[in-house]
Image: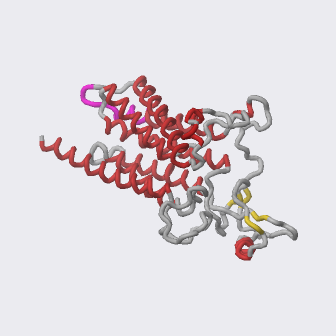
Amino acid sequence: MPLYINFPTWIHPEIFPGVPVLGMIRWYGLMYLFAFGTAYLVLKRLMKEGALNTRDYTATEDDLFSFIATGIVFLLIGARVFSTLVYDTSGIYLRKPWLIFWPFDEAGNFTGLAGMSYHGGFIGGLFGMIFWCLRKKRPILQWIDAMVIAIAFGYTFGRLGNFLNGELFGRITTMPWGMVFPHAQQFSASIPWVQEFAAEAGMVIQEGQKLVNLPRHPSQLYEALFEGVILGAILWSVRNRKPFIGFTSALYTIGYGVFRFVIEYFREPDIDLGYRIEAVSGTPTYLNTSWLNISTGQILCLMMVIGGLLLMLFSWLKSRRSKDK
């Protein structure tokens, strides 16, 4: 009996595969629209609750639109630049930087802006929000406190987009919810450990079969649940009970960093990058043989946790000074 799930054959990166013009519309891009739409609705609800108001000013819907639009522009720039310059190892974007925002491959096929980095988007979006608040003379931490709640819920759709694309999957697993992704690395059926792993997963290797596609953790769904839904629910529950301004922003930064750091142990790092810190040398990326092997994403998450703790301390000290006055 199979102890795994096959990736649905009807799911393609394109929503209308093979249809002229409509074939350019992809699930990943549509999920971005859902993400931004969800973020807007959440932020609008928070605005109605008064989360963006001050003693001297009441936020308007125009503020909402311009704030989100500015954040989105900076987010997309940061996510794309970070992805191409940090995660790409070919060096093509350093030699031809205009390709960073070129939505076609070398054959002229439309690919969209394939390749986005969350951490780059985090940095870009942060700069965008700070820029808007300074320009409009709005309290930075108060607006970001509200925005991170919206970001968490919207983020869920981004990871669902990765799942529908069949990308950013996890390491191989024998868990019953493991999934066979069509574009994952395949292994020689003649290797003993592959045969043992397949048998444990209930996978039958046919006679004469040369390659085996083993089940993997659906890590995109793990991220959508923990870094999106659960983290968003935590932030939503404390929105009216936060002890000081800046607390929610810090909590989001710390919470995302912790959740993502743990999930990275189940998600396969980029094969060409491997591990940034490798306690056990020669470890393949599709196996988790040591908790001390640290990926690029985990290093960035540790930086987020440290940054979140510093922001928590700064915000607390600032609130104390305000009370003393």
Q: Main SS type for the magenta part?
A: loop
Residue 4, quarter of picture:
bottom right
Q: Nearer the viewer, residue 170 or 192?
A: 192
Classify residue 156 as left or right of residue 236. right
Q: Up-down: is 196 above or below 257?
A: below
Q: Nearer the viewer, residue 217 or 51?
A: 217
Reply yes or no: does residue 1 show up in magenta: no
| Residue 227 spot, x, y in % from top left | 49, 52
Query: Quadrant of the image for the C terminus?
Result: top left
Residue at the front extreme, as displayed = 95
Residue at the right extreme, as displayed = 207
Q: Up-down: is 149 above or below 174?
A: above
| Residue 244 spot, x, y in % from top left | 27, 45
Residue at the top extreme, as displayed = 62
Scheme of image coloration: secondary structure
Reply yes or no: does residue 52 show up in magenta: yes
Residues drawn in magenta? 44-56
Residue 157, visible in the rendered structure: no
Residue 66, visible in the rendered structure: yes
Residue 58, quarter of picture:
top left
Q: Up-down: is 118 above or below 195?
A: above
Name the residue rendered at 62%, 64% in the picture.
286
Q: Up-down: is 5 above or below 304?
A: below
| Residue 245 spot, x, y in % from top left | 29, 42
Name the residue rendered at 73%, 36% in the picture.
107
Classify residue 95 as left or right of residue 10. left
Query: Quadrant of the image for the N terminus?
Result: bottom right
Residue 282, quarter of picture:
bottom right
Name the residue rendered at 42%, 25% in the picture.
61
